[in-house]
Amino acid sequence: MNRTTLTEQIIETRIRKGITWADVARELGTGKEWVTTACLGQMTFSKDQAEKVVAIFDLPVEAVAVLQSPPTRGLDAAAVASDPVILRLREIVTVYGPTIKELIHEEFGDGIMSAIDFRLRLDRREDPKGDRVELVLSGKYLAYPTV
Amino acid sequence: MNRTTLTEQIIETRIRKGITWADVARELGTGKEWVTTACLGQMTFSKDQAEKVVAIFDLPVEAVAVLQSPPTRGLDAAAVASDPVILRLREIVTVYGPTIKELIHEEFGDGIMSAIDFRLRLDRREDPKGDRVELVLSGKYLAYPTV
Amino acid sequence: MNRTTLTEQIIETRIRKGITWADVARELGTGKEWVTTACLGQMTFSKDQAEKVVAIFDLPVEAVAVLQSPPTRGLDAAAVASDPVILRLREIVTVYGPTIKELIHEEFGDGIMSAIDFRLRLDRREDPKGDRVELVLSGKYLAYPTV
Amino acid sequence: MNRTTLTEQIIETRIRKGITWADVARELGTGKEWVTTACLGQMTFSKDQAEKVVAIFDLPVEAVAVLQSPPTRGLDAAAVASDPVILRLREIVTVYGPTIKELIHEEFGDGIMSAIDFRLRLDRREDPKGDRVELVLSGKYLAYPTV
Amino acid sequence: MNRTTLTEQIIETRIRKGITWADVARELGTGKEWVTTACLGQMTFSKDQAEKVVAIFDLPVEAVAVLQSPPTRGLDAAAVASDPVILRLREIVTVYGPTIKELIHEEFGDGIMSAIDFRLRLDRREDPKGDRVELVLSGKYLAYPTV
Amino acid sequence: MNRTTLTEQIIETRIRKGITWADVARELGTGKEWVTTACLGQMTFSKDQAEKVVAIFDLPVEAVAVLQSPPTRGLDAAAVASDPVILRLREIVTVYGPTIKELIHEEFGDGIMSAIDFRLRLDRREDPKGDRVELVLSGKYLAYPTV
Amino acid sequence: MNRTTLTEQIIETRIRKGITWADVARELGTGKEWVTTACLGQMTFSKDQAEKVVAIFDLPVEAVAVLQSPPTRGLDAAAVASDPVILRLREIVTVYGPTIKELIHEEFGDGIMSAIDFRLRLDRREDPKGDRVELVLSGKYLAYPTV
Amino acid sequence: MNRTTLTEQIIETRIRKGITWADVARELGTGKEWVTTACLGQMTFSKDQAEKVVAIFDLPVEAVAVLQSPPTRGLDAAAVASDPVILRLREIVTVYGPTIKELIHEEFGDGIMSAIDFRLRLDRREDPKGDRVELVLSGKYLAYPTV
Amino acid sequence: MNRTTLTEQIIETRIRKGITWADVARELGTGKEWVTTACLGQMTFSKDQAEKVVAIFDLPVEAVAVLQSPPTRGLDAAAVASDPVILRLREIVTVYGPTIKELIHEEFGDGIMSAIDFRLRLDRREDPKGDRVELVLSGKYLAYPTV
Amino acid sequence: MNRTTLTEQIIETRIRKGITWADVARELGTGKEWVTTACLGQMTFSKDQAEKVVAIFDLPVEAVAVLQSPPTRGLDAAAVASDPVILRLREIVTVYGPTIKELIHEEFGDGIMSAIDFRLRLDRREDPKGDRVELVLSGKYLAYPTV
């Protein structure tokens, strides 16, 4: 039993029992974005959170310790690398990435947007020409040293 | 003279003359995100826009036709693939991509966020613990066929 | 049990029982192209469709929920990447892809053919010099933003 | 002067002079799909066709011989590998490729659709929900040996 | 049970029982090259052939259906990609491939040698300076369209 | 001036002057396969051969020394890696490679077919169902050490 | 003239004129590590620093603006990817990377060492068994969000 | 049972039993950096060390021999290649690697820092602006031959 | 049971029973280099050798046939591709490979050193500055055809 | 002018003037292996050596400084990666690499053969069955730390 096998169990149980990510977020008192990321094996749970996750997804009790240990990130993402949802995100980085680099430098100076001190929000925006997915990415600006 | 050489000239002239992307946006009456993306060779200009770009960046007059022709996208992005700003964006796709996939499916059904019918906004959010880069990505939801 | 293992079972059972894709399409009342794509793990079934698939291929009853959940696309395609049928399709993209790009731009403007709002049809065309495979690919035109 | 440099000249001259692919097709008396593919360096011109191409695009007279020599295919396609139009075609091969393989086998037996004895057609289909790009791919069926 | 597992069983049983490929060819009344290719999972057997293969290699009776179904080609070849016999064949394609391309064009025009309508023969040629492996590759010439 | 630039000049001059590979072979008194391979930069010419090649293709006199120096092989082959003629040869190695390995071992023992002590022949075989390309590959058998 | 060409000029001039990196650091009043990184095209100079660099390396006056603009990082590093000094650094990441990950988590919790808010120091440590290179890498600890 | 499976058991047991790497270091009387590297499968234990590791992590007694045998290094590192902690280390090699190369050459001459005769130290440095991770890498200088 | 699983068993049994490669060489009456290569799955054993290997490593009796069958080479080498011992060998090919090519051509003419008719010897050379590993690689010279 | 352009000039001049590597070695008083490696851009010359190289190959006088500066290694090797001489060396690493690893560990313990403190010798060994290339690789043994 390691984090990867727990993630697989969570994914399978969620579908079988018809649990929504919003349900899990409510149960743990966190945002739906964070809790989904954590359940997919990309974040560390606190003891309290881990116990609730074990209960919701019928995991073995030893999982409480594993869910509190920092995971190896990115493994499951590799498994979805050919999925069109992910391909669109990569294409956005390809087409708009240099723009984002230019505008961060113009607004802040020589530095980056952190991917660690970072929050994601996903919302539905109604639109008469077809509803839209809106992603808000917020990361701390980090500056390069100057001497 | 093709789009790639024009993009290089724009980049070099902008730095040499100290033009900001905000200046260019004001001049063309568009958002700074769109105009930067277009000047980096990823969007097609209208005739009017192309003439202004030629004037701002001292491009040869034949550039007006080239700038109105749909570009081959992604070429310049490849050139910045090793830059830490871009690497952070890719990492965000790796760590949060499966989350985005799950939440789109939970909120909308089986489909994706378009990368074509798509808008980007980049803002500075002041924060006492250090200012933050905020990216808003808005793309139309597109559903898969069901029969 | 996840979507990948169900796809493997469907493939093995179909051969063993001698079921044709046309049979499955008739049973579900859909096109043969869509149903084959879905059975190969690339589309989401409705509840009614999922129950019929479970019956046809002797799948366990829990499969009904899994088949209704959006799949991770492209996984099985990777497994056939060295097959000559797939290699020919890739070669067509290599040799004719830039042509398709040029003609979409000439006919519609700066945009793409959607791969989501998309339908496939495969027919046999009789020909005295040898019958031909005819593929019809129909995708919605999506335009890039212009400001 | 080789085929690659001629292709670059054709692309640049076409944009500068505002020639359409449909114009070129009319001039040469061929389909717009074949002539675009050939002008992009993927097909061999006859002597008569080569002379017309040289005239249309102001190429040097030595180009007549080069345009009649079989090209090395796929080189320019590599240059557009990151373009979203091409990425969608690749995604279609990934998601629908195994389906195409299955249905060719069901309809014809163990063989493939030729990419050489092959024709492409691209049309606009009007649609109230947004016009559609329609691609028709027609390739001869080739069977594998059976003993 | 799928084609891949059957191939593994055939390979292991052949070695354990000391069967030669020539034996199998004699039994099925085919060439040794075709039957070896088919037993390695790259060709489709007829019902009669499949039944003989099942008998020779002690396969389960359900294998008769699987062996008659078109395989996914190239999978096992990937497994031997680092073997020096295969490396030499690839090197021959690298060093002599452009020669073959030139001479096909000189002899036939703009087209290719088919890899589907194709036959292989392997013979031993005695030679005082050391015996030689002789491979004869025969494929139908396929021409590109000219308008 | 190095071997790569000489190869490019040979290729361009041959097309421009309408020289055939058979012409060159006759002039040098070698097989058409060897001389094409050598002119494409993959073989070393003798002094006498080099002088004839320089004369045929109008090369500078210093080329005589360069053509007699062993080349770096495979460079030009890389340039044609996406060409369908080459792709078919690679596919043949993928599909029939393991067969060739098995049959060499069955006929000769544990060893390989040399790619150095190697000869190629390409012929046209007339056939009522369409003429065929016939390649004969002959390489010395080399055995692995046994203690 | 862009940052890449300036970096090449700096590298060539430094060798030709026999300037040491320690000289440059003294001149600019910065650490030798930072100034070398900046001269190799990986950091942004201030106006004052840029003017000194232009003077030291005989660069054209327009270089002052280019050197103050945030660079695309990592480009030159790619050029040295096969060098043994770099290969040893990569091997250290391979062999000791998971250790570093474990010990950061044990000492700090779930987070990373920043590569932006980061300083490098390189010293010589005398040692009777052979002098040693000592690298000190200091990066700010950044924690992942916990809800 | 091989080294890879032992490493997996160590990782799982450590989390389940709440053992710290500092605990293991104390028990074996070594540095925490070396012992973590060794437990992750990258170093060879002495007999005495191996017996203690077997006791601490409840490994089978046959593990004592395996842990004393030189491992195949880098295997587990591959498994964490997508983790942000490792990505930052790689980025540091990309951005600062050429600097390290230059400064080794300036200080020592033409040679490298050994990755074998090498020691790692990881410490926490308190800092009012946020604590810092400090890595000290010490490797013997090795010179290239000069004649 | 195939050659790969036998190799794994040999590796594990050797460590568990404390057998040295020198022991195995003595038992079989071969060089330690050949026998190690063969036990690692890269050479074919004779019947007599295979029976001894089965006895030494407690392999099942069916292994005698498998060990006499030519293996697929290079598979296990792939598994050690990240190991520093192997990385140094690759680096030597990178840094000294072109030298070896030049000197073979200068000494012998246009040809190669065979990797099949090839012998390896590994010895320890005592040296006051630290003992040295000495590898002797001996391969037959093979010449390219000249007409 | 940088090291790469000097290497190209050396290679072209050597062929044009008919200089042998043995000549260069004699002139500089070094081994032919070292001097060839250095002339191919992989070693640093002393002042005295550099001046002789400049004289032999008619290089510009500024080359004296460049040839004394440590090079970026491996660049030219990449250019010959497809050459059969190099391919054989790589294959030897693939087939015999794990053997070398095992025997170094058996003879010396857990460590490697250095690729820096390393010497190469290439000799011709006469043999009635065909002369042989003999390579002697000698590298210092380096041990891993044990606590």
Image (cartoon, coloured by chain):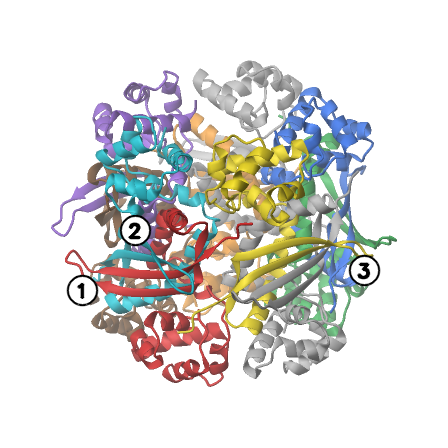
Chain colours: A red, B cyan, C brown, D purple, E orange, G yellow, I green, J blue
Image marks 2 and 1: residues in contact by CB distance under 8 Å: no
- Judging by the rendered image, the residue that carries numbered circle 1 is C29
Q: Badge 2 is on which residue?
A: D108
Instruction: Name which quarter of the figure residue A112 lies in.
Output: bottom left
Q: Name the residue under label 3.
A: I29
Label 2 residue SS: helix
Q: In this view, does B23 lie above or below E59?
A: above
Counting from the top left corner in percent of width and height, residue D100 is at 31, 53
Q: What residue type is labelled 3?
A: Gly
Quadrant (top left, top right, bottom left, bottom right) of the N terminus of chain C = bottom left
Q: SS for tag 1?
A: loop
Q: Which residue is drawn at 53% across and 46% down?
A: G42
- Disc 1 marks a residue whose amino acid type is Gly
Image location (x, y in percent) of residue A121: 32, 65
The answer to whether marks 2 and 1 sit on the same chain is: no
Lateral position of residue B8 relative to residue A133, left or right: right
Q: Quadrant of the C terminus of chain C?
A: top left
